[in-house]
Image (spheres, coloured by chain):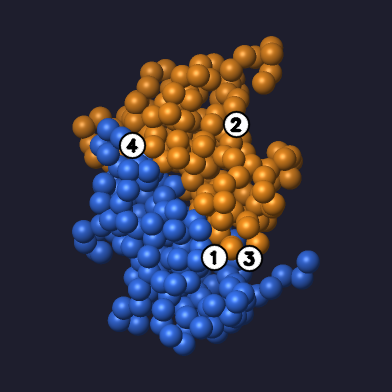
Amino acid sequence: MNESDPAPGLELLNAAFRDFIPHNKVLGFEIIEASFDPPYVIARLPYDERLVGHPDSGLLHGGVVTTLLDAAGGAAVYTRLNSPQSIATLDLRIDYLKPAAGRLAVSSRAECIKCTRNVAFVRMTAYQEDLTDPIAMGAATYMIGTPGQAVTQGFLL
Amino acid sequence: MTIVEQVARARQTGDWNSLIASVPYAKFLGVTLEERDGTLLGRMKFSDQLVGNPHLPALHGGTLGALLELAAQFELMYRAQTLVLPKTVTLTIDYLRSGRAQDTFVRAKTVRQGRRVATVHTWAWQEDEHQPVAQATVKQLIISEAP
């Protein structure tokens, strides 16, 4: 964590995204770094044998990376919102650059590039030990503030 | 038996559920598979641990994405004239509706199978197949890459 720019409400973000969302909780999802400026989070999923996609190799399934990017992206939107609002994933596009290797945790840095009244735009990178050696890249949009409408796909506070 | 051998056997026996049951992550999500009317029909059984929004409640978007990706992979293993395991290159998901606290079904269709890359369209629904909760286009490599 960067000492000069301490994480804004890291505990609040984890309360919302790690503890409150059942699927994130069961995966062991955790936000380990967050910033308002630039507006990003870094989130991590530990290696877990239940999430393996190829029994022969023990490698994690791509769907695990999809879930991590979706969850990290949602948390990144929260670094741009003035007040908690319901958000919903609108679309998510992922390039799989290479498989997740070995029995290592997967991390994602997600940055909210732009946040308008209705839509937030996010870019994500998934990596294992080195951010500059990514395993996947993601681009997502999230609908913001959908009170009373049952369109919420992801995270509601 | 290697996965490739298991795929070959599933093609002969039509027992695709045994194959997907051998994938730990598919089991974790509660996904089962059956051959029906010349296609594979997948089902993700609802459980509380799949929830992404406890207020509504609604399924986590990641679980729907993973279900769509699994369906695309198995569509190619079911359909493609290759014994190389398909490798996902890109995935583009549209979230269309909230996934409710109930079972979700999935089907996939090969849009085009080229020599190296196949494009698969896949869609997931709960009550009405014509009202999908999410859909995706998945590009998969179907040749082995030289290291």
Report the front residue among A84 and A127.
A127
Amino acid carrying label 2: it is: Ile
Q: Which residue is mark 3?
A: A56
Query: How far apart, in angstroms, are the residues tagged by discs 1 and 4?
Result: 29 Å
Amino acid carrying label 3: it is: Asp
Query: How far apart, in angstroms, are the residues tagged by discs 3 and 2?
Result: 30 Å
Instruction: Name the chain letter of the residue that bears numbered label 2.
Output: A
Q: Mark 2: which secondary structure?
A: strand
Q: Which residue is mark 4?
A: B53
Mark with earlier residue (3, 2): 2
For the colour orange, the matching chain is A
Q: Decide: marks 3, 4 in contact (CB < 8 A)?
A: no
Instruction: Name the chain letter of the residue that bears numbered label 3.
Output: A
For the colour blue, the matching chain is B
Are the residues under badges 3 and 2 in a single subunit?
Answer: yes
Amino acid carrying label 1: it is: Lys
Mark with earlier residue (1, 4): 4
Are the residues under badges 1 and 4 in a single subunit?
Answer: yes
Q: Residue at x 43, y 75 (%)?
A: B16
Q: Name above or below for residue A92 compared with residue B39.
A: above
Q: Position of residue A24 (x, y in %)?
A: 45, 38
Q: Which residue is mark 1?
A: B139
